[in-house]
Amino acid sequence: MTNISFTHDNKEFVIESTITGRETILLNGKVVSEKRNLTNLNSVHQFSYEGQNYELKLGWNMIQRLVHVTLTGNSQLLHDQDFDLQGKAFDTQKMVIPKWSYLFIVLCIMIPFIARGGALPFLIGILGMGGCIKVSRKSTFSNAKKLAICAGITALCWLSLVFLVLVLAVLRVK
Protein backbone atom coordinates (compact mmCIF):
# COMPACT_ATOMS: atom_id res chain seq x y z
CA MET A 1 0.00 0.00 0.00
CA THR A 2 1.28 3.44 -0.89
CA ASN A 3 0.39 6.39 1.33
CA ILE A 4 1.32 9.83 0.08
CA SER A 5 0.55 12.94 2.06
CA PHE A 6 1.22 16.62 1.56
CA THR A 7 -0.16 19.88 2.86
CA HIS A 8 -1.36 22.84 0.84
CA ASP A 9 -2.98 25.96 2.29
CA ASN A 10 -3.42 24.29 5.70
CA LYS A 11 -5.24 21.37 4.08
CA GLU A 12 -3.84 17.87 4.39
CA PHE A 13 -4.13 15.73 1.28
CA VAL A 14 -3.63 11.97 1.65
CA ILE A 15 -3.50 9.56 -1.26
CA GLU A 16 -3.93 5.89 -0.48
CA SER A 17 -3.27 3.34 -3.18
CA THR A 18 -3.48 -0.41 -2.70
CA ILE A 19 -2.11 -3.27 -4.75
CA THR A 20 -5.68 -4.02 -5.85
CA GLY A 21 -5.75 -0.66 -7.65
CA ARG A 22 -8.04 1.16 -5.22
CA GLU A 23 -7.07 4.83 -4.99
CA THR A 24 -8.57 6.90 -2.19
CA ILE A 25 -8.10 10.64 -1.79
CA LEU A 26 -8.64 12.12 1.66
CA LEU A 27 -8.77 15.84 2.37
CA ASN A 28 -8.45 16.75 6.06
CA GLY A 29 -9.38 13.15 6.91
CA LYS A 30 -12.53 13.09 4.76
CA VAL A 31 -12.78 10.81 1.70
CA VAL A 32 -13.34 13.11 -1.30
CA SER A 33 -12.60 10.70 -4.16
CA GLU A 34 -12.26 6.97 -4.60
CA LYS A 35 -11.76 4.89 -7.72
CA ARG A 36 -10.18 1.68 -8.92
CA ASN A 37 -7.27 1.99 -11.34
CA LEU A 38 -5.82 -1.34 -12.48
CA THR A 39 -4.82 -0.75 -16.08
CA ASN A 40 -3.69 2.86 -16.38
CA LEU A 41 -0.46 4.36 -15.02
CA ASN A 42 -2.13 7.77 -14.93
CA SER A 43 -5.30 8.64 -13.08
CA VAL A 44 -7.30 11.78 -12.49
CA HIS A 45 -9.48 12.50 -9.46
CA GLN A 46 -11.90 15.43 -9.62
CA PHE A 47 -13.66 16.57 -6.46
CA SER A 48 -15.01 19.62 -4.64
CA TYR A 49 -14.24 20.68 -1.09
CA GLU A 50 -15.54 23.78 0.69
CA GLY A 51 -16.69 25.34 -2.57
CA GLN A 52 -13.40 24.83 -4.43
CA ASN A 53 -13.02 22.42 -7.36
CA TYR A 54 -9.89 20.28 -7.33
CA GLU A 55 -8.23 17.98 -9.83
CA LEU A 56 -5.55 15.61 -8.59
CA LYS A 57 -3.48 13.76 -11.20
CA LEU A 58 -1.35 10.74 -10.38
CA GLY A 59 1.34 9.58 -12.77
CA TRP A 60 2.85 6.22 -11.82
CA ASN A 61 6.37 5.58 -13.16
CA MET A 62 7.14 1.98 -12.24
CA ILE A 63 10.60 2.00 -13.85
CA GLN A 64 11.84 4.84 -11.65
CA ARG A 65 9.48 3.74 -8.86
CA LEU A 66 7.98 7.22 -8.55
CA VAL A 67 4.54 8.79 -8.38
CA HIS A 68 4.11 12.27 -9.83
CA VAL A 69 1.33 14.20 -8.09
CA THR A 70 -0.20 17.33 -9.59
CA LEU A 71 -2.94 19.21 -7.78
CA THR A 72 -4.93 22.00 -9.39
CA GLY A 73 -7.67 24.05 -7.81
CA ASN A 74 -10.03 26.19 -9.86
CA SER A 75 -7.70 25.66 -12.86
CA GLN A 76 -4.58 26.92 -11.00
CA LEU A 77 -1.56 24.75 -10.20
CA LEU A 78 -1.39 24.29 -6.44
CA HIS A 79 1.05 21.42 -5.93
CA ASP A 80 3.47 19.53 -8.19
CA GLN A 81 5.78 16.94 -6.63
CA ASP A 82 7.31 13.49 -7.02
CA PHE A 83 7.08 10.80 -4.36
CA ASP A 84 8.70 7.39 -4.06
CA LEU A 85 6.49 4.33 -3.67
CA GLN A 86 6.86 4.50 0.12
CA GLY A 87 5.22 7.93 0.05
CA LYS A 88 8.31 10.00 0.78
CA ALA A 89 8.90 13.20 -1.15
CA PHE A 90 11.51 12.57 -3.85
CA ASP A 91 14.00 15.10 -5.14
CA THR A 92 14.29 14.55 -8.89
CA GLN A 93 17.72 16.27 -8.77
CA LYS A 94 18.99 12.92 -7.43
CA MET A 95 18.28 11.48 -10.86
CA VAL A 96 20.56 13.96 -12.66
CA ILE A 97 23.93 12.63 -13.75
CA PRO A 98 26.62 15.34 -13.36
CA LYS A 99 28.32 16.32 -16.61
CA TRP A 100 31.83 15.57 -15.33
CA SER A 101 30.90 11.90 -14.79
CA TYR A 102 30.24 11.32 -18.50
CA LEU A 103 34.00 11.12 -19.05
CA PHE A 104 34.24 8.10 -16.76
CA ILE A 105 31.03 6.57 -18.09
CA VAL A 106 32.28 6.78 -21.69
CA LEU A 107 35.68 5.36 -20.70
CA CYS A 108 33.93 2.36 -19.17
CA ILE A 109 31.57 1.92 -22.13
CA MET A 110 34.60 1.88 -24.48
CA ILE A 111 36.00 -1.29 -22.88
CA PRO A 112 33.94 -3.84 -24.86
CA PHE A 113 34.65 -1.93 -28.10
CA ILE A 114 38.40 -1.81 -27.47
CA ALA A 115 38.36 -5.52 -26.58
CA ARG A 116 36.35 -6.18 -29.76
CA GLY A 117 33.48 -7.82 -27.94
CA GLY A 118 33.19 -10.63 -25.49
CA ALA A 119 30.99 -11.24 -22.48
CA LEU A 120 33.61 -10.42 -19.86
CA PRO A 121 34.67 -7.06 -21.37
CA PHE A 122 31.00 -6.20 -21.78
CA LEU A 123 30.35 -7.08 -18.13
CA ILE A 124 33.38 -5.08 -16.97
CA GLY A 125 32.25 -2.04 -18.97
CA ILE A 126 28.61 -2.19 -17.85
CA LEU A 127 29.51 -2.66 -14.19
CA GLY A 128 31.97 0.24 -14.36
CA MET A 129 29.41 2.47 -16.05
CA GLY A 130 26.73 1.57 -13.48
CA GLY A 131 29.11 2.16 -10.60
CA CYS A 132 30.09 5.59 -11.92
CA ILE A 133 26.46 6.59 -12.42
CA LYS A 134 25.49 5.45 -8.92
CA VAL A 135 28.43 7.20 -7.24
CA SER A 136 28.02 10.43 -9.21
CA ARG A 137 24.39 10.74 -8.04
CA LYS A 138 25.24 10.13 -4.38
CA SER A 139 24.27 13.28 -2.50
CA THR A 140 26.15 12.36 0.70
CA PHE A 141 29.57 12.54 -1.00
CA SER A 142 31.44 15.70 -1.90
CA ASN A 143 32.17 16.26 -5.60
CA ALA A 144 35.89 15.63 -5.00
CA LYS A 145 35.11 12.28 -3.36
CA LYS A 146 32.72 11.31 -6.17
CA LEU A 147 35.34 12.23 -8.76
CA ALA A 148 38.02 10.18 -6.99
CA ILE A 149 35.75 7.13 -6.65
CA CYS A 150 34.66 7.31 -10.31
CA ALA A 151 38.31 7.60 -11.38
CA GLY A 152 39.11 4.56 -9.23
CA ILE A 153 36.22 2.53 -10.68
CA THR A 154 37.29 3.41 -14.22
CA ALA A 155 40.94 2.55 -13.51
CA LEU A 156 39.89 -0.75 -11.91
CA CYS A 157 37.81 -1.61 -14.98
CA TRP A 158 40.69 -0.92 -17.35
CA LEU A 159 43.11 -2.87 -15.13
CA SER A 160 40.64 -5.76 -15.15
CA LEU A 161 40.63 -5.68 -18.95
CA VAL A 162 44.46 -5.69 -19.04
CA PHE A 163 44.52 -8.59 -16.57
CA LEU A 164 41.97 -10.48 -18.69
CA VAL A 165 44.05 -9.95 -21.84
CA LEU A 166 47.23 -11.13 -20.07
CA VAL A 167 45.51 -14.24 -18.72
CA LEU A 168 44.17 -15.08 -22.16
CA ALA A 169 47.62 -14.50 -23.71
CA VAL A 170 49.23 -16.88 -21.20
CA LEU A 171 46.56 -19.51 -21.84
CA ARG A 172 47.12 -19.26 -25.62
CA VAL A 173 50.88 -19.74 -25.25
CA LYS A 174 50.38 -23.01 -23.37
Image (cartoon, helix red, strand yellow):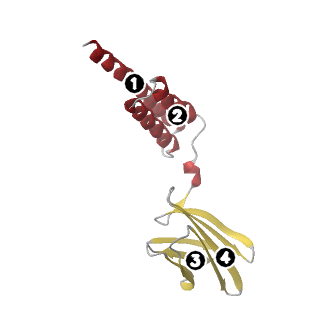
Q: In the visual, does 47 lie left or right of 147?
A: right
Q: Which residue is mark 4?
A: 55
Q: Which residue is drawn at the image coordinates 38% and 33% (left, top)?
A: 119
At mark 2, the secondary structure is helix
Other-residue count near label 2 (Cα within 10 Å), few / some / many at <14 / 14–19 / ≥20: many
Which of the two labelled residues, at mark 3 and mark 4, occupies the earlier sequence position?
A: 3
At mark 1, the secondary structure is helix
Find residue 9 and report its horizontal and vertical position in percent.
Answer: 66, 75
Q: Which mark is residue 44?
A: none
Calculate the distance from the C-alpha at mark 3 to the C-alpha at mark 4.
15 Å
Which of the two labelled residues, at mark 3 and mark 1, occupies the earlier sequence position?
A: 3
Residues tagged 3 and 1 counted as in contact (Cβ below 8 A): no
Which of the two labelled residues, at mark 4 and mark 1, occupies the earlier sequence position?
A: 4
Find residue 40 and report its horizontal and vertical position in percent.
Answer: 55, 69
Judge whether residue 9 can be spotted in this image.
no
**Closer to the camera: disc 3 or disc 2?**
2
**Closer to the camera: disc 4 or disc 1?**
1
Find residue 55 and report its horizontal and vertical position in percent.
Answer: 66, 76
Q: Which amino acid lies under the numbered mark 4 shown in the image of this protein?
A: Glu
Residues tagged 4 and 1 counted as in contact (Cβ below 8 A): no
Q: Which amino acid lies under the numbered mark 2 shown in the image of this protein?
A: Ile
At mark 4, the secondary structure is strand
Q: Which mark is residue 105?
A: 2
Calculate the distance from the C-alpha at mark 4 to the C-alpha at mark 1.
55 Å
Calculate the distance from the C-alpha at mark 2 to the C-alpha at mark 4.
42 Å
Q: Nearer the viewer, residue 106 or 31?
A: 106
Q: Which mark is residue 161?
A: 1
Which of the two labelled residues, at mark 1 and mark 2, occupies the earlier sequence position?
A: 2
Q: Nearer the viewer, residue 143 or 98?
A: 98
